[in-house]
Image (cartoon, rainbow, N blue to C red):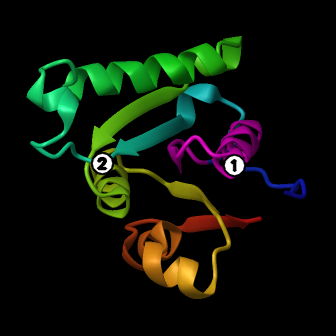
Amino acid sequence: MEPLDINLSGLSRVLVPIDFSDAAFAAQTAALTWVGDPSHLHILHVLPPLSPGEPGITWQTVNTASRQQHVEQSFRDRFSSKPYEKVQFTVLIGTPSIEIIRYAKEQHISLIVIPSHGRTGMGRLMLGSVAERVVRRSPCPVLVLRR
């Protein structure tokens, strides 16, 4: 991803949805640089709901809270530097595009910065595009960072 010269310091609430991919971490790092104040950066990860037939559910070894805690710990372990202490990191359960939009509305987000994985053809048709759905339904401007 090429560096962009962008100043978002006037925005008080910037959201970066992440899926733990390299593209998402690059968008997150760029947004942190652009925003200036880490407390203005919201990072969101959306987990899919567990189905009742999952072995962890059946054996009662996994639940929503434990999954969310594991993801948060993984994020905090990877990003333990000082600026990330003030970043607002949230883990939700649901459909990514729906939860991203809902979070943006509830938190009065000024801008969403989202990476696009650049899938085309059958890959995009089969998987859909979270970035595209967010752009279409977002209550605020969306900056899509292409690979």
Residue 15: give x, y in percent of width and height: 51, 47
Q: Is residue 60 left or right of residue 48?
A: left
Residue 92: give x, y in percent of width and height: 30, 39
Q: Residue at x 36, y 74 (%)?
A: 137
Q: Is residue 24 magenta?
A: yes
Q: Is residue 55 left or right of residue 91?
A: left
Q: Looking at the picture, which amino acid does disc 1 mark? A: Ala
Q: Could you tell me which quadrant the C terminus lies in?
A: bottom right
Residue 145: give x, y in percent of width and height: 70, 63
Q: Residue at x 74, y 45 (%)?
A: 26
Magenta-drawn segment: 11-34
Q: Residue at x 90, y 58 (%)?
A: 2
Judge by depth and name the residue closer to the eye, 42 or 24.
Answer: 24
Residue 24: give x, y in percent of width and height: 64, 48
Task: Give the Cα separation between the discs numbered 1 and 2.
Answer: 22 Å
Q: Could you tell me which quadrant the N terminus lies in?
A: bottom right
